[in-house]
Image (cartoon, grey):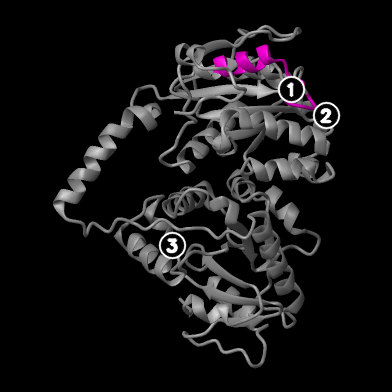
Amino acid sequence: MATVSSDLNAAEDSSLPARRLLLLGFQGSGKTSTLNTILSQKKNNSQTDQQHWVNILTWRLLIIDTPGWKLETEGTTDESDSKNQQSITDRCSPGPHALLMVVPIGVPFTEHHWQGLWARVQALGAGIWRHTIVLFTCEDQLPQDMGVEEFIVDGGAALQRLVERCGCRYHALDNTCSDKSAPVAELLQKVEEMVQENQGWFFEMARPNLGFGDEDTENEREEDRGTEVEGTAAMFSSSPRELRVLLVGWSGAGKSSAGNLLLGCRVFETGRPTEVSVCHQALVAGQCLTVVDTPGWDWFSVQRTPSSIRKQIKLGAGLLHPGPHVLLLVIPVVSTLTPKKRQALKGHLEMFGKEACQHTLVLFSCGDRLYGTSIEDHIQRDRGELLKLMQHCWNYYHVLDCTKASQDRSQVTELLRKIEEMVAENGEKPFLPVKLNTELDKEKMSGRCILQ
């Protein structure tokens, strides 16, 4: 493990923008080699001892290498992981602007790797994926006629899932290359773009509980957890576990068809506009899945959505009391998202409060109309508006092809897995809390769902 560290005041002395970078990955992934590659571009007068930051190109950087994870732990975090996390949190205070998830190209990234990575990443805190880039090392091991994109496609579901969770942000480095200036500059530019997307905010890492607290404090924590079970983690208290889903979106977007596909049966009426919110439930993949279909809102403006429709949407949310785990924002892949439409979508989501984006997954309907194009390419090609929407919804998205409803249920189980990941990442707020419909009837309807 290598470190280039300092206190925050050292960065404040420079006119260059200060950025804190954290290297993460399994043992042998190439983190330290990557650190050396980046440091090879430092300015001649820039010191790299443990008391100074380092000037590279147009940035003032603090770069922290970390101990490699052991794959043998099989998705669990042990005491050494917690101690390492505590040390990293202290050295990277107040938090990293970017986390570089280092993955070697020469080693298959399996489901086993994903489970181990997921457990450790989630322990660092909620919202981490918005600050993470996949950094592929050993680019020289790619076949001559293969690009990084093809490698990701051929790398399997686990690798694709990792890249997807990082908002399709990735970069490749050849640490053996003699001229490293261009790839390092491109990497740092991608980091800067991500920082700007996050409005300059850094990631505040969670501090692990090392078990040093006194017995009274631990008892108090246990009591607090007990009182929160019913209110904020009810989905984990019953068997089979329940997932509560609210379908929202434009009129004619395919919400009812998506609901039927999720539940595995035709319970929502299709072919005509939904006028009232309807709730149905089924046992899907061992889970109790409750789905509410809602009337469609206007394509261009919140103000053009009738108050009766807004009321029905709020009543639909109330059917999922204490609140939906996910808002599935249904968008047909055949539709063109303009700036006006995107603003209208954000405005409608704000009916559920400012935290609605943390619980929203964009569900692309009419997946058969992609005609072989990947959804990532589709998002990139849509003049940037879809990409902005993805960033607003924390890069959670999925595609459904209703023409394969009977023969391919894997698209449903994959969607449920993504919802579970969202719930886990939201930590102590696994669902978006709403009031009961009886309580809503007593409130003055103001166009906004009433949060608890």
Residue receiving disc 3: 69
Q: Is residue 429 above or below residue 262?
A: below
Report the amino acid beneath label 3: Trp
Q: Which amino acid does label 2 sit on?
A: Ser
Residue at image coords 23%, 56%: 211
Name of the residue lying farthest toward the front: 444
Label 1 near label 3: C-beta < 8 Å?
Answer: no
Closer to the camera: disc 3 or disc 2?
A: 2
Residue 313 on the magenta span: yes
Nearer-N-terminus badge (3/2): 3
**Mark count:** 3
Q: Report the span colored magenta.
A: 299-316
Q: Of callouts 3 and 1, which one flags the residue occurring earlier in the amino acid sequence?
A: 3
Q: Which mark is residue 335?
A: 2
> Which disc is residue 250 wearing?
1
Q: Residues within 10 Å of mark 2 (few under 14, many from 20)?
A: few
In space, the residues marked 1 and 2 are separated at their CA atoms by: 11 Å
Choose mark 3 or mark 1, whichever is in front.
1
